[in-house]
């Protein structure tokens, strides 16, 4: 007479066999594809953080300099206020160029490297 | 490398650790997606991909309280349910009960039954069960998760999980009995 545990084990084995009949396949490069996405995401995050930090430093230095000018009673600030339109335009262009150079360009080179690596 | 160290490395941005984690758990995720969301390879791959992206995005919220595989399986479960909801436009019904029609088969003597025949009966019966039954059975028998872990993965009450497993077991008993006679079941169980 077989014990209950032995019979349960037989049923368990039977179930495992039936359940392991899986009608799907895992592509060979599945983990690689995901790792690539992981790397791209990491790179984006790193570049944006670095850019943000650099921008903060620049804003800090500019703000500090402006404060010094204001406190010293210089009339540079008032001339800036009168000509705010071209100054804001120049600032926007500078920030964009800085973003393009520090983030977009580096990311494009990184993606190009990945593409090159994939085609090998 | 244990789960704690693996997660620590992934949080640091170590791509080799991430690749290792994907390779280690891809079969589990594919299996859940396949059981839950159907038979199309492309759908299964999409779900699996979404799961591992979610794992990375939410890795900071992983607490070492449960096994990494349990946590990943719970993400796979939720993602598969969301996928079904999207596909069926919210017509998801997890209260489905198995509808198995009893068929009379000739009562073969037990000695003639081969293991492959039993496996065939089990596979056929399994295919007729609702997805939530199949998934719970798969998590329990194939992935060898405990009741508590299955509860964590599926968010189902413990009683429901136990009832699914017991009912499924009884369904298999009666199916095998129908096809191969009373003696067949006696080999597998002595409580019948």
Image (tube, rainbow, N blue to C red):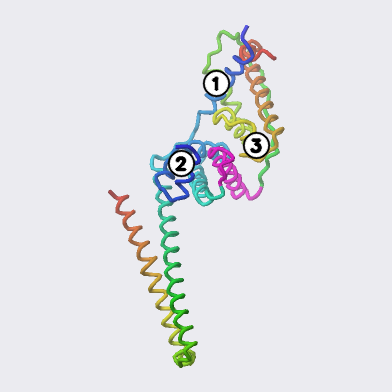
Tell me if residue B130 can be seen. no
Residue bearing mark 3: B151
Quadrant of the image occupied by residue B168:
top right
Closer to us: mark 1 or mark 3? 3
Asked whether, in this view, residue B176 is left or right of residue A96, the answer is: right
Chain of the residue where label 2 is placed in the rendered structure: B
Q: Distance between the residues labelled 3 and 2?
A: 23 Å
Question: Are dots 3 and 2 on a single chain?
Answer: yes
Point out residue B59 in the picture as x, y percentages from the top left corner: 52, 48
Question: Are dots 1 and 2 on a single chain?
Answer: no
Residue bearing mark 1: A13
Residue bearing mark 2: B21
Closer to us: mark 1 or mark 2? 2
Tell me, yes or no, whether the two marked residues, 3 and 2, touch with CB atoms within 8 Å: no
Chain of the residue where label 3 is placed in the rendered structure: B
Q: In this view, which residue lies farthest toward the front?
A: A72
Tell me if residue A81 can be seen. yes
Give the crowd class for mark 3: few <14, some 14-19, many >=20 residues within 10 Å: many
Using the image as rendered, state which of residue B105 and residue B6 is in the foreground.
B6
Mark 3 / mark 2, whichever is N-terminal:
2
SS majority, magenta: helix
| Image position of B60 with respect to B116: above or below | below
Tell me, yes or no, whether the two marked residues, 1 and 3, touch with CB atoms within 8 Å: no
Q: Give the label on residue B56, or none.
A: none
Q: How far apart are marks 1 and 3 (CA)?
A: 23 Å
Using the image as rendered, state which of residue A110 and residue B119 is in the foreground.
A110
Using the image as rendered, state which of residue B192 and residue A81 is in the foreground.
A81
Quadrant of the image occupied by residue A46:
bottom left
The stretch drawn in magenta includes residue B76: yes
| Image position of B59 with respect to B154: above or below | below
Chain of the residue where label 1 is placed in the rendered structure: A
The residue stretch that appears in magenta: B62-90
């Amino acid at each position: 007479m077989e014990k209950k545990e032995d019979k349960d084990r037989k049923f368990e084995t039977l179930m495992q066999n039936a359940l392991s009949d899986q009608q799907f396949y895992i592509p060979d490069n599945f983990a690689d594809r995901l790792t690539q996405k992981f790397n791209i995401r990491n790179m984006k995050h790193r570049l944006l953080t670095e850019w943000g930090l650099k921008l903060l430093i620049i804003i800090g230095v500019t703000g500090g300099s402006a404060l010094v000018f204001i406190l010293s009673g210089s009339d540079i600030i008032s001339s800036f206020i009168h000509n705010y339109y071209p100054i804001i335009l120049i600032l926007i262009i500078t920030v964009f160029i800085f973003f393009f150079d520090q983030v977009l360009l580096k990311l494009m080179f990184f993606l190009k490297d990945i593409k090159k690596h994939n085609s090998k | 490398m244990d789960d704690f160290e693996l997660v620590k490395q992934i949080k640091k941005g170590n791509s080799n650790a991430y690749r290792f984690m994907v390779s280690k758990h891809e079969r589990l995720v594919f299996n859940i997606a396949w059981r839950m969301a159907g038979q199309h390879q492309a759908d299964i791959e999409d779900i699996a991909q979404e799961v591992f992206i979610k794992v990375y995005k939410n890795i900071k919220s992983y607490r070492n309280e449960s096994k990494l595989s349990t946590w990943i399986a719970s993400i796979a479960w939720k993602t598969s349910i969301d996928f079904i909801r999207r596909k069926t436009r919210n017509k998801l019904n997890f209260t489905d009960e198995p509808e198995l029609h009893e068929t009379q088969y000739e009562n073969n003597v037990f000695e003639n039954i081969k293991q492959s025949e039993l496996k065939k009966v089990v596979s056929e019966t399994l295919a007729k069960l609702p997805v939530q039954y199949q998934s719970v059975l798969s998590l329990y028998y194939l992935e060898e998760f405990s009741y508590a872990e299955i509860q964590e993965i599926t968010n189902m009450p413990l009683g429901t999980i136990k009832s699914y497993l017991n009912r499924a077991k009884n369904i298999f008993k009666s199916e095998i009995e129908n096809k191969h006679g009373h003696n067949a079941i006696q080999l597998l169980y002595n409580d019948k």
